[in-house]
Amino acid sequence: MRREPMFDLIIQGARVVDGTGNPWYYADVGVRDGIIAALGRLPGDAAAALVYGNGLVVSPGFIDIHSHADTDVMVNPRAESAIRQGVTTLVTGNCGFSAAPITAEKREELKAGDLLRDLEISWLTMAEYLVALERCRPSVNLVPLVGHGTLRNVAMGYEQRPPTPAESQKMAAHLSQAMAEGAWGLSSGLIYPPGCYADTPELVELARVTAGYGGIYASHIRGENDTLLDAVVEAITIGEQAGLPVQIAHFKAMGRHMWGKSRESLGLVDRARAGGLEVTCDQYPYEASATGLAAFLPPWTQQGGNEGLFERLRRPDTRLQITADLLNGVPGWVSLHKGVGWANVVITSSPSNRFDGQTVSAIAASRQQDDFECVYDLLLEEGNRVGVVYFTISPEDIIRIMQHPAVMIGSDSGALAPYGPLSRGKPHPRTYGTFARVLGKYVREGVLSLERAVSKMTSLPAQKLGLHDRGLIRPGFAADLVLFSPEAINDTATYAEPHAYPTGVQAVVVNGVLSVEDGEHAGAGAGRVLRRPA
């Protein structure tokens, strides 16, 4: 009589980099019922499936602490650009924008934006959204945050003013319900309308609601160039006053005039931690940033949402005022244009895809236009759906930030694919390359040890979120695993050709299911929506 195998899967003979930061060691990894069941010398015939790891490293699956894949898996549940790097968990709802909670009144408005990608929206609440995600059977796990900008839009639209007491109460009620339904924290995007219209006390009030549920506050802070230090202080202040952990997103110092400022900004993080605040950061390993073209405009231009923006852009006198503000600044706001220049801003996506890969200055020259006028026309012509990248970050700052013990890795990207509707445009190469680039370029150059790099992608984000059964190779933990060659792993995505998978990732296991095999997607939909425990 044939015995049932002890394990569903064994990864045999690999070097184990277990996520703790400790030196690697040899062990076989046995998986049963979605859980790491055993470590050690395990007989190959004890498994239903055997994966040979000779010459390879097995580590916990990577946790992308900062993604924007909120609805990408509804378009393509395979999450190709993420899982092909070894990412098994995506944290969504970042930079103040989440797919829920919303209201029926806002449904059509939100469908016109990039986040909801013209989807049929079947949900309003966080609970309904998470069920909709589960129905897609995604290939990776999903961890939702609640966006402050989404809450503000639902409560009061794109109004540049403080909320009334009733509006504050409405935001708090939506947030409280979303947290009770499984969200892990509150995010903010303080350079983007409507989030940028909020003052610090408004954010503290909502962060206190989040703290009551044991959540975190994750912030795209109020400026990463001239206002960097003040913006870091604000994030720390919110954490201190609300009493909750802080995550500062895509930590950087933007603009040549700011290069080297990461010493001071990291010093603020160190001082806050020394004072007892749990503040950490994340980073993507590239010299270019990415956002929407409208993020370059002063906040007042977008009061009232797209309708208000388009009305202003159609008026010549208002265009002159916008240009003056971009050149001279506005009190309390510093334009991304300062220190960048339109010659360094590259269009990556738009509904027409007419100008993908070209700089704003080159497009303006081809149209015989002033650069500023070209920007305003592009926003009108493309319905404010223009993505851009811009080169502003010092390589030395990237290394300094990466080596800091409180910094983890996050892609700041969606989950795209080189085929189908998610292949349009030229996204930032971090979409396909973030984790492979750290393990390839930066580990091989000696910036980080392999073990330390892996810990920044696994146990550190798991610890931050409170994912107490993920992020380590340890018996009893969820079997999210990646098998890769430390010699061959590398990013291949470029700014010119960004839809390119990395090399060197041999296999990926999600909740015990072999989801990438021999470097190819196996078609499995083994991911789960991870809800914060009550």
Image (cartoon, helix red, strand yellow):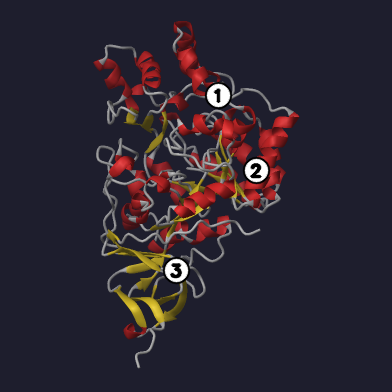
**Which residue is at the far top?**
317
Residue to which mark 2 is pinned: 175
Q: Between tags 1 and 2, which lies in front?
A: 2
Say which residue label 3 marks: 479
- From the viewer's perspective, tell me whether residue 227 is left or right of residue 500: right
Q: Residues within 10 Å of mark 2 (few under 14, many from 20)?
A: many
Which mark is first along the chain, 2 or 1? 2
Residue kind at label 1, given as amino acid type? Trp
Single out the residue that lies furthest toward the bottom.
1
The answer to whether residue 27 is seen in the rendering is no
What is the distance, in whole Å, between disc 2 and disc 3 at their CAs? 31 Å
- Please say if 346 is above or below 517: above
Q: Quadrant of residue 205?
A: top right
SS category of the residue bearing label 3 = loop
Residue 213: percent from left, percent from top = 68, 52
Three-letter code for the amino acid on which mark 3 is drawn: Ala
Depth check, front residue: 14 or 122: 122
